[in-house]
Image: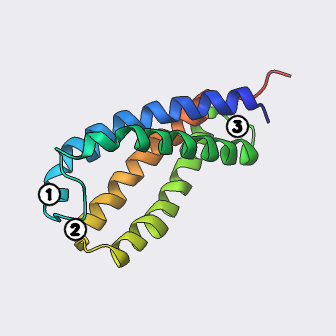
């Protein structure tokens, strides 16, 4: 495992996730989130929490890039990354979205939308990690 490549993959994944999150969760899904006042932060109060959110994303992407590196099988980066991203998306849908649906006062439609959005998110993040964390040329 190459720590430099893990770090570069984590940074790339953080960037990809931030852009995807802004476009999907911050733009396309805002009306769905607004249907659940008191559950999600408002557009007015949310920006104050963005620095902590991005720190959390970066820490998470370091962890997930490390997990990717430990399971990397040496195949083409994009294929390996998409396979990895799909597995993380399945985990996300089952554990994160399923738990959120059970604990938060959200509807089935929003839970399903979050699972679908998570699929796209983790496929892109996995692809980014796979493209950056390449096979060593040793």
Colouring rule applied to residues: rainbow
- Residue 42 position within the rendered picture, expressed as x and y whole percent measured from the top left: 18, 51
Q: CA distance from mark 3 to mark 2?
A: 37 Å
Numbered disc 2: secondary structure: helix
Numbered disc 3: secondary structure: loop
Q: CA distance from mark 1 to mark 3?
A: 43 Å
Seen from the viewer's position, the closer of residues 58 and 123 is 58
Q: Relative to residue 86, is residue 99 drawn left or right?
A: left
- Quadrant in the picture for the C terminus: top right
Mark toward the start of the polypeptide (2 vs 1): 1
Check disc 3 and report the residue beneath it. Answer: 75
Q: Dot 3: within a 10 Å radius of its alpha carbon, few (fewer than 14), some, or many (20 or more) residues?
A: few
* Contact (Cβ within 8 Å) of mark 1 with mark 3: no
Vertical position of residue 119 compared to residue 8: above or below:
below
Seen from the viewer's position, the closer of residues 22 and 55 is 55
Check disc 2 and report the residue beneath it. Answer: 109
Check disc 1 and report the residue beneath it. Answer: 34
Seen from the viewer's position, the closer of residues 92 and 57 is 57
- Residue 33 position within the rendered picture, expressed as x and y whole percent measured from the top left: 20, 57
Foreground mark, 3 or 2? 2
- Quadrant in the picture for the N terminus: top right
Foreground mark, 2 or 1? 1
Which quadrant of the figure has residue 101?
bottom left
* Contact (Cβ within 8 Å) of mark 3 with mark 2: no
Q: CA distance from mark 2 to mark 1?
A: 13 Å
Residue 78: assigned label: none
- Residue 77 position within the rendered picture, expressed as x and y whole percent measured from the top left: 63, 33
Numbered disc 1: secondary structure: helix
Vertical position of residue 13 compared to residue 99: above or below:
above
């Amino acid at each position: 495992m190459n720590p430099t490549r893990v770090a570069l993959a984590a940074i790339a994944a953080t960037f990809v996730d931030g852009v995807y999150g802004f476009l999907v969760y911050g733009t396309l899904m805002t009306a769905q989130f607004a249907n659940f006042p008191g559950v999600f932060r408002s557009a007015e109060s949310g920006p104050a929490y963005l620095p902590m959110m991005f720190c959390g994303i970066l820490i998470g992407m370091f962890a997930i890039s490390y997990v990717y590196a430990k399971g990397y099988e040496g195949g083409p980066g994009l294929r390996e990354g998409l396979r990895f991203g799909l597995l993380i998306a399945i985990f996300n849908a089952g554990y994160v979205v399923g738990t959120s649906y059970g604990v938060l006062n959200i509807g089935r439609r929003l839970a399903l939308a979050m699972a679908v959005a998570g699929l796209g998110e983790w496929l892109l993040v996995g692809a980014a990690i796979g493209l950056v964390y390449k096979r060593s040329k040793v």
